[in-house]
Image (cartoon, coloured by chain):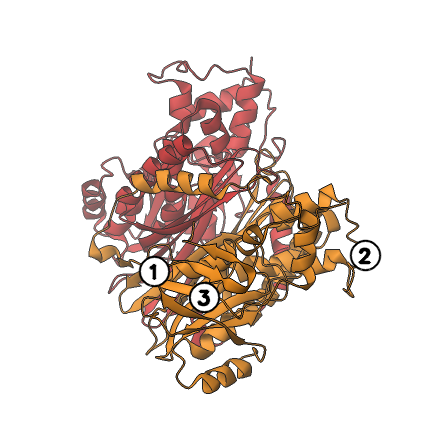
Chain colours: A orange, B red
Amino acid sequence: MGGDGRNPRWSYARAGVDRAKVSEGLKALLREVRYRPPPASGRPIDAPGHYAGMVRIGRETIAMTTDTVGTKVLLAAELHRWEGVGEDAVQVNVNDLAAVGARPAAFVDTILCSRPDPEVFRSIGRGIERGLRASRCALIGGETAVVPDIVNETDLGGTAIGFFPPKRAPVTGERIRWGDVVIGIPSTGFHANGYTLIRRILEENRVDLSRPREGATVSLGEELLRPGRIYVPISEAVAGLPEVHGFAHITGGGVRNLSRLNPRARFVLDGWPSPDGLFQWIQELGGLRAEELFETFNTGIGFAVIARPVRLSALLRRLARAGAADARVVGHVERGGGVELPNLGVRYEGYS
Amino acid sequence: MGGDGRNPRWSYARAGVDRAKVSEGLKALLREVRYRPPPASGRPIDAPGHYAGMVRIGRETIAMTTDTVGTKVLLAAELHRWEGVGEDAVQVNVNDLAAVGARPAAFVDTILCSRPDPEVFRSIGRGIERGLRASRCALIGGETAVVPDIVNETDLGGTAIGFFPPKRAPVTGERIRWGDVVIGIPSTGFHANGYTLIRRILEENRVDLSRPREGATVSLGEELLRPGRIYVPISEAVAGLPEVHGFAHITGGGVRNLSRLNPRARFVLDGWPSPDGLFQWIQELGGLRAEELFETFNTGIGFAVIARPVRLSALLRRLARAGAADARVVGHVERGGGVELPNLGVRYEGYS
């Protein structure tokens, strides 16, 4: 059987995803791209390393995100259940818009497949519909490519654009300062990231996905394919408030995502919950070190609001009305940089 | 050796891409997506079947396209030459913006790969840079996913957004009517589509890509990896003119793309050139029927401008100043529907 936590064995790198190498590749690409178009083509807004790109067009600022569901689709294929990952294709993108305080306007999906199975497409469509409803976003196009020589199964992703309604500016994290609080919004399980690692651990332990894990009431398959929570209503409820300084979508990179917001802030997550349920289960099964766990998964908190603690109870009430009665303070900001979980003995110096 | 044109053997469907099945899958998906967001989320503009989706945000109309380079990347991988397909990742998208008369503003790339090779990423970056310069567009983000369990090699694509400068409206083809002329803009070879078929034909005929085909001066590899022409300057030069009624990007679907513009117009392409050079070569090598050739490739004309023939010589001069001194009238519009190449005995009734 799997590791026991004292015998660390699995890591994201061992599962085939070496973040440092990805970062190196990406840097090589970006070094070549230096072109800046004339202002008549729109004015890009610099927000380096952020969740969404932004460009000023006429009198509007448009935010744009692109992302895929990753290898979670392979689990969907194995279990013949595609609706959840359809919703995730929207979710992974609109949550990144939510993280800059942009209101989603339009989405386009991308499906690469080895063959177009109408039943699979119908399920994906149902999921996309759910994602669009939850984020109040329109589908305005897409790309379906049948490329059996490129993909083994199906790749699913998309791109979303959003905007800033009157009197709302991009929420970049720039105004974060010491004394701010970190409010955590619970997730409903894994987001659509880290599944290459999850699947390796499942395979090695010959886990039966048709049965629930200990302590759960639904099958593991259902639990693992549950779509990520959509945090758009959270962001919409508070993005315009002056005391709200930053948002973090806790996805690939885990809690280290907080570092993207402001390099001069140290996020001390002294109220972050210990991993339980699904997160504790995967940690034990894979023998994952805590450092690995927290920089790979959301571990139970999927979105964070960083705010000046003035009118904090009013802010929490507002989040509750937007569907997050479960929001709570999980940390605070100090001078410095990086992210720290003091109770769990984990600290990171930057994002990657 | 290959077919001789009298013995038709290859088709896009036989190569593994059955357009009817793709269309069926896509319809199954779209039937499930019925949600229309409230106006506060932006107002999608209906332009069914068009090159770009459009949404009204505040006082701007934003056009959005998403597309991949398709299996042209497999040829790039085989020949270790990635710059051209990097440029294509921009090209396939900005040309679809050009086809609705939108000015490109921002692009995000998507790279799915089995491993991130910095040398490959650098070349792709150089190509993206070239594409951005040619279309005056900014890179504002992207997604790099290392997913060895999903892709065999590398998939390359992206999403672009554009807008309509003051006094310019979307060019949809709605105003096309009988008597309009079709002006063709020559391509510089294949666009980034149809490569699944091209590769099958190359393989079957054991073609040596390091040597030129008869009549060519560069190697076939170089010719086949040449990036598609960027038609943005063409569109920019004439999109605001009242006599310009439509644009067509002649990509997957070939000349049938004209039918997307207006179902009540019949496009009679009596001046469309006979396939020569690379196009004649692939037709002969693959034994492709003319119907197959013209609905799969651009066959030498990559972009079309449909216009009322008032001040036609002024329009052609304007196109020449925008880099298309080679533009010429290749057909006209009659009442009815579909696309016809009377000199070549080819006719189609619709788009798919």
Q: Secondary structure at mark 1?
A: strand
Label 2: element kind:
loop
Question: Label 2 amino acid?
Answer: Arg
Residues tagged 3 and 2 counted as in contact (Cβ below 8 A):
no
Residue position marked by numbered label 1 in the rendering: A54
Q: Earlier in the sequence, mark 3 or mark 1?
A: 1
Crowd rating for badge 2 (residues with CA inside 10 Å; few <14, some 14–19, many 20+): some
Question: In what quadrant of the picture does the N terminus of chain B appear?
Answer: top right
- In what element is the residue under mark 3? strand
The residue type indicated by label 1 comes to Met
> Gap between marks 3 and 1, in whole Å?
29 Å
The reply to whether dot 3 and dot 1 touch (C-beta < 8 Å) is no
Residue A208 position (above or below residue A146):
below
Q: Which residue is mark 3?
A: A268
Q: Label 2 belongs to which residue? A: A211
Horizontal placement of A346 versus B305: left or right? Answer: right
Chain label for disc 1: A
Residue B12, horizontal then vertical, whole percent: 58, 33
The mark found on residue B201 in the picture is none
Q: Nearer the viewer, residue B323 or A33?
A: A33
Q: Is residue A53 above or below residue B120?
A: below
Which one is nearer the viewer's eye here, B267 or B240? B240
Q: Residues within 10 Å of mark 3 (few under 14, many from 20)?
A: many
Viewer-closest of A327 and A148: A327
Of the pair B133 and B245, the residue shown nearer to us = B133
